[in-house]
Amino acid sequence: MTDLFEAEVTTTTSLDLRRVQRLQRRARRRKWALAFIAIGLVLLALAGSVAYNFLTTTFANNSTEVADYDGLGQGTVQVVIEPGDTGADIAATLYAQGVVASEQAFINAARANPDSSGIKPGFYFMQREMKAEYALLALLDPSNRDLRKITVPEGKALDYYFDKIASLTGASLDEVRAAAEDTAALGLPDEAAGNLEGWLFPSTYQFNPGVTPSDVMREMIATTIKTLDDAGVAPQDRERILTVASLIEKEAKLDVDRPLIAGVIYNRLDREMNLELDATVKYIAPSDGPFVSADDKLVDSPYNTYMYAGLPPGPIAGPGAKSIDAAVNPASHDYLFYVTVNLDTGETRYATTYDDHLKNSQILRQWIDANK
């Protein structure tokens, strides 16, 4: 019986041991299984995250991609930028004309370039299918504008202006003169009394295609008014200042002489002396050369300042800004006479007495004799 119990004990212990080992193996398998599952879940999560980011980025890029051309374009198209056009307006115009691939491409290019605010209204020559950045640069380049230019130098009378305006606009001289008669439509102030002389400011102007004679004269008159306003000239004094300035413009060759000649004019007016200016005689009796003849001085006209005292009835030419400034701010002196003694350099001598003036005039005669 002892052997039986001992055998039974031994057998029971072996079975328990094997059971424990099986349980341990199962536990290890479960542990590894759980570990593998955890690792799998982590890898799956990572893969999902990568896939999500890829898809999100891809669709996001596709949704924000802006159509744009690559090159400088081809062909030629005329684009009109209207006054007051915003960046969006310009973008829409360029897109409608086939210049850019999308409005947004141009808007983006304009936002990236601080100079884009400098686009001026006008007519532009551009290419089709341009990269938006290049289209913007083309609009900022003045050489791409289709402009009509006119340049009028100082000291010219109305006939010269009319001829230049006719050439610019393609109108006939008769059509220009007809437009000049409607002074109210041109914005000529009442103080001019309907006389355009002196009111068409000498300068360089730029106009869009299709400009009319009225457009040109209106711009010139507006520039004259602005110049007078900037010089502090009251409206009631405009015609007088323009008249004095036109005399200075015709008489002075050098800028240094403008205020000095203005001073002589005002000094003679204050003393009720005739101005005796050759320039006013040449206005009514044009002739070649710098001098007027004795017969010309006998022409009966209120513009003849040898015959009539005071200023002529109005300007005799278009004065520039420097002559207007001299008329407003004359030099303070006692001179009553002046004479240009060198017609090449414009050197001018001044005198307070007639005897001194005769001496200066003799210097001029010597120069004439030496230079024929």
Image: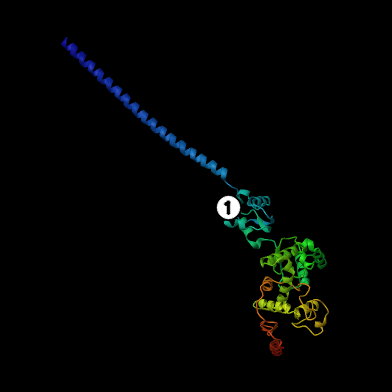
Query: Residue 162, located in which quarter of the rendered image?
Result: bottom right
Residue at position x 28%, y 20% in the image = 19
Q: Nearer the viewer, residue 326 or 25?
A: 326
Image quarter (top left, top right, bottom left or bottom right) of the N terminus: top left
Q: Secondary structure at mark 1?
A: helix
Residue 143 picture location, percent across and down? 65, 63
Residue 248 picture location, percent across and down? 71, 76
Residue at position x 41%, y 32% in the image = 41
Residue at position x 67%, y 61% in the image = 145
Q: Quick one: which residue is furthest to the left in this view?
A: 2
The 10 Å Cα crowd at callout 1, few under 14, some 14 to 19, many 20 or more, is few
Q: Amino acid at mark 1?
A: Arg
Query: Residue 344, located in which quarter of the rendered image?
Result: bottom right
User: Which residue is disc 1 drawn over?
Assistant: 111
Q: Nearer the viewer, residue 293 or 36?
A: 293
Residue 358 picture location, percent across and down? 71, 88
